[in-house]
Image: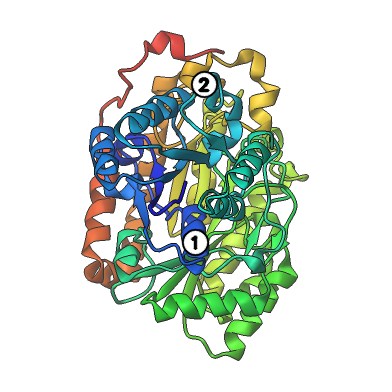
Amino acid sequence: MTAKRILLLRITPSILRTVNHPVHHYPPLTLKYIQSILSQKNFINLKLIDDEVDHLKSAELIKQISYDQPDILVLFANFISPDFIRAFSQRLKQVTTDLFIIAIGPVATWNRESLLCNSSPIDVVISGEAEQAVAELIEQLSSGDNSTQDYYRQKFMHTNAAITVEDLNSLPYLEFSKQELKKYSFIYPVRLNKKVYCGYMETSRGCVCKCIFCSQYIRKSYSDRLRFKDAKRVVDEVENLVSKGANFISFEDDNFASASEHVFSICKEIKRRKLKIKWAAEVTIDEVNEELLKEMRSAGCEFLQLGVESGSGRIIGLLNKTNQPETWGLRCKKIFNMARQIGIATCALLMIGSPTETEEDIRKSINLAICLRPDLIKLHFFCFYPGSKARETFSEQLIDAKRIQYMYHHDYPYINLSKIHSGRLIELRREFYKRVLLSPRFIMNHLCKYFLYYLCNLGNFKFLISKTLSLLRNKKNLPKRFDLGLLDKR
C-alpha cells in the first residue's frame, strides 16, 4: 500500500458545541505535531479536519471522507464512546477503498481493548503521546514493503502501555496558518486593545500532582514524569508563531510552573531577546510565589488560570489538592492578591459536585471566589473520568458505563456522589456564577479593564455574552437522555 492521501481527523461529540457554557476550543496539538512531522517527510497529500470547530455532522464527515478517499485515517477522539467510534469507522470503511484506520487520543488510550475487539474496523490503536509513533507507522505503511508493514502493525497491535515522548526538543515546530489562528480564538478576555490572534504551544509535559479528579483523559499530556523543552527552543517556537501572525501565546502545559527553574529560564530568554509578546498559562497555587509571578509578568505574562477547586478545607483534602488543606483558602487569597498587585489577570478554576460535598461546602466556595476577586471564574462539575484516582476509589458506587460515557464537566452531573441532588447542583452552579459575575463591583472592574478588548474582538464578546446569558437563565437545563431519579447514586 502506498499512502498518497492521509487524513488527520479530530472527532468530538455535539455536546461540546451545544452545551450552554462557554467552551474554549483548543487546537488538536497531537494532530498538528503529526501534520508537521509528515510534512517534513514530504507527505504532501495531507489534510486535517477538526470536527470540534468545523462543526460537521457525522453524515457530512462521512460524505467528505468518501469524496477525499484517503488511504490512511488518523482518528483522534475524546468524550466519545468506543461504540460510536467503531460504528463510525465501519461506515468509513464502507465508503472508502482499503482505508487503514489508526486510532489515537484519550478514548483510544483508555478504551484500547474495546476498540480492538473482534470484527473491529480499526486497524491499529496507539496509546499515549502518539505523534512520533504514528508518523513512523505511516512512513512504513507507505514504503510498499509488506514485511515491514506487517512488523509495524504487529508492533503497535501489542503495545498496551501509553507511549511518551522523552525528548520534547525532537518534536517539530507547530505550524498554524492565519486562518487557523482565527479559528482557534482565545475566548477569554485579555488586556490587549487589538484583535487577538492566539498561537498555541507547549513547553513541558507531565504532571506530578496527585489530585483525585485529574485524568490523562482530559489533560494535555501523559505520564506523571516531567519533561521539558529547552528555553531557547521554547522561545524559538514563540518567535515562529509570531512570524505566522500570532500576537498572543497560550502555553498549553498541564502545569506551566511545575518546575520554577524552567519558568525562570524561559522568562529570561524572552527578555534577553527583547521579545514583546503577551502570554497565558495554567499554574497551581502551591507552585507559584511572588518572585516567580514578578518574573513572569516582566516577561509578558498577562493571564493565569489557577486551580482553586473549592473553598472547603474538607473537600480540598478529599481531592488531594494539597498537603495543607486547612490553610488552602488563605494561600489562595495570598496568591490572587499578589497576581493582582503585580498586574497579572487571573481566572479561578472551581468545581462543584465532589463526592460527599454538601451545600455548605459550596457556599464556602462561593464566598472564597468572591474574596479572591479574580478577573474570571470557570466552574466545572466533578467527573469520574477514566484514569482518575476518583474513578478507581469510588468504582463500586459508580453507575454503568453507558452513563459514564456522557460525562462532560460543563454539561450535567450524570454521575453524582455529592450530598446534593443533580438538579440542585445545576441551580447552585447558576447561583455561583450570578453571585460572582453579576456583582456591581465585578462588572465595573471588568468593563474598565476589558472594554477596548471587547470592542476589538466583537466575535468573542458576542459568544461569551450569549453563552453566559444562556447559562444564567432561570431554567432547569436538565438532560433528556435519562430519568433524573436514576442519575443520583448517593
Q: Residue at x 60, y 25 (%)?
A: 113
On the image, the x and y values in percent for residue 164 come to 68, 50
**Quadrant of residue 447 within the rendered picture:** bottom left
Q: Residue at x 60, y 67 (%)?
A: 338
In terms of secondary structure, where does tag 2 sit? loop
Image check: 290 left or right of 84? right
The correct choice, above or below, for 177 with respect to 6 in the image is: below
Q: Does 99 sit left or right of 63 as displayed?
A: right
Q: Identify the secondary structure beneath mark 1.
A: helix
Q: Is residue 346 left or right of residue 477?
A: right
The circle on residue 389 is none
Query: Picture quarter containing residue 475?
Result: top left
Q: Amino acid at mark 2?
A: Asn
Neighbourhood count class around disc 1 (C-alpha, 10 Å): few under 14, some 14–19, many 20 upward: many
Depth check: 387 or 112 in front? 112
Instruction: Return the disc, 1 or 2, that comes first in the chain's sequence.
Output: 1
Judging by the rendered image, the residue that carries numbered circle 1 is 38
Q: Quadrant of residue 456?
A: bottom left
Q: How many marks?
A: 2
Q: Residues within 10 Å of mark 2 (few under 14, many from 20)?
A: many
Picture coordinates of residue 37, whole percent (x, y):
53, 63
